[in-house]
């Protein structure tokens, strides 16, 4: 069974930092590309960041570029999101997501349950 | 960056109704289009990939169509568990942007 389990969420003050972790199991993590997606209260889904299986390529949404860093440890089957200079608008549920490809079309086929990050003083 | 729009932003329907949601891309994305269902308190769920391919385990009342810049998600015979928010997503670029969502609620 595929599982993605996020941890590390919590309450942080504006300007602070937090690191989210996602532990993966049930699939070949080292060959899978991974993403983070978030949903702010009352808002829609927002793609946040992407990392290739080898960590060779990383992308970020403009809203987090320069503040967030994605990384992974294939030996630990884990992906991370390092969040710095946090703002109130970063308050959201953060989902760890696996990118799966079928018939040459890729999508987000497995999602974690999400980690809540609240940025408030 | 590719921008995605959806219409309507919300709709009210009854159990048994047929519902169609439209998604448009700011440039041609071929059939690099996915649909997700998101219920409150749950993780989003992949319904359709590649514009028209039903994800394994998803009921056949869900169907998708379109190519280029305009796409549709149709739900035939709406069931109580289908009341949720639906998002389209482009996978043409590696920045997998989502549409703003369409909330389907009970009339």
Image: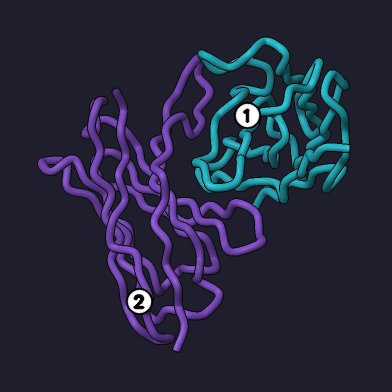
Chain colours: A purple, B cyan
Tell me the distance, in whole angstroms, between the alpha carbons under discs 2 and 1.
33 Å
- Number of other residues with Cα within 10 Å of mark 2, as a class: few under 14, some 14 to 19, many 20 or more: some
Q: Which of the 4 image quadrants contains residue A23?
A: top left
Label of residue A28 in the image: none
Q: Which residue is found at the position 31% from the left and 72% from the top?
A: A18
Q: Are marks 2 and 1 on the same chain?
A: no
Q: Secondary structure at mark 1?
A: loop
Label of residue A84 in the image: 2
Q: Which residue is found at the position 66% from the left and 28% from the top?
A: B81
Q: Is residue A19 left or right of residue B40?
A: left
Q: Which of the 4 image quadrants contains residue B15?
A: top right
B33, A108: nearer the viewer? A108
Label of residue B32 in the image: 1
Q: Is residue B26 left or right of residue A11?
A: right
Q: Is residue A1 above or below residue B70?
A: above
Q: Which of the 4 image quadrants contains residue B84?
A: top right
Give how far across and how far down residue B83 sits, in percent.
72, 35
Give how far across and how far down residue B82 sits, in percent.
70, 29
Q: Which residue is found at the position 78% from the left and 39% from the top?
A: B104
Q: Is residue A108 left or right of residue B49?
A: left
Give how far across and how far down residue B39 sits, in percent.
61, 40
Mark 2 chain: A
Mark 1 chain: B
Q: Please tell me whether mark 2 or mark 1 is closer to you in this view.
A: 2
């Amino acid at each position: 069974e595929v599982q993605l389990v996020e941890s590390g969420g919590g309450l942080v003050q504006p300007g602070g930092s937090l690191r989210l972790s996602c532990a993966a199991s049930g699939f070949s993590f080292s060959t899978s590309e991974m993403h983070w997606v978030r949903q702010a209260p009352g808002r829609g889904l927002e793609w946040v960041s992407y990392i290739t299986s080898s960590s060779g390529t990383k992308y970020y949404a403009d809203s987090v570029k320069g503040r967030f860093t994605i990384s992974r440890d294939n030996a630990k089957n884990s992906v991370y999101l390092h969040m710095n200079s946090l703002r109130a608008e970063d308050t959201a549920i953060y989902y760890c997501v696996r990118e799966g490809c079928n018939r040459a079309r890729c999508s987000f086929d497995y999602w974690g349950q999400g980690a809540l990050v609240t940025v408030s003083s | 960056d590719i921008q995605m729009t959806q219409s309507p932003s919300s709709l009210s329907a009854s159990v048994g109704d047929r519902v169609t949601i439209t998604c448009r891309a700011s440039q041609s994305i071929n059939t690099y289009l996915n649909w997700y269902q998101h219920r409150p308190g749950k993780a989003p769920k992949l319904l359709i990939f590649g514009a028209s391919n039903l994800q394994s385990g998803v009921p056949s009342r869900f169907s998708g169509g379109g190519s280029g810049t305009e796409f549709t998600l149709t739900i035939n015979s709406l069931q109580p568990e289908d009341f949720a928010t639906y998002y389209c997503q482009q996978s043409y670029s590696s920045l997998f942007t989502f549409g703003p969502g369409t909330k389907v609620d009970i009339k």
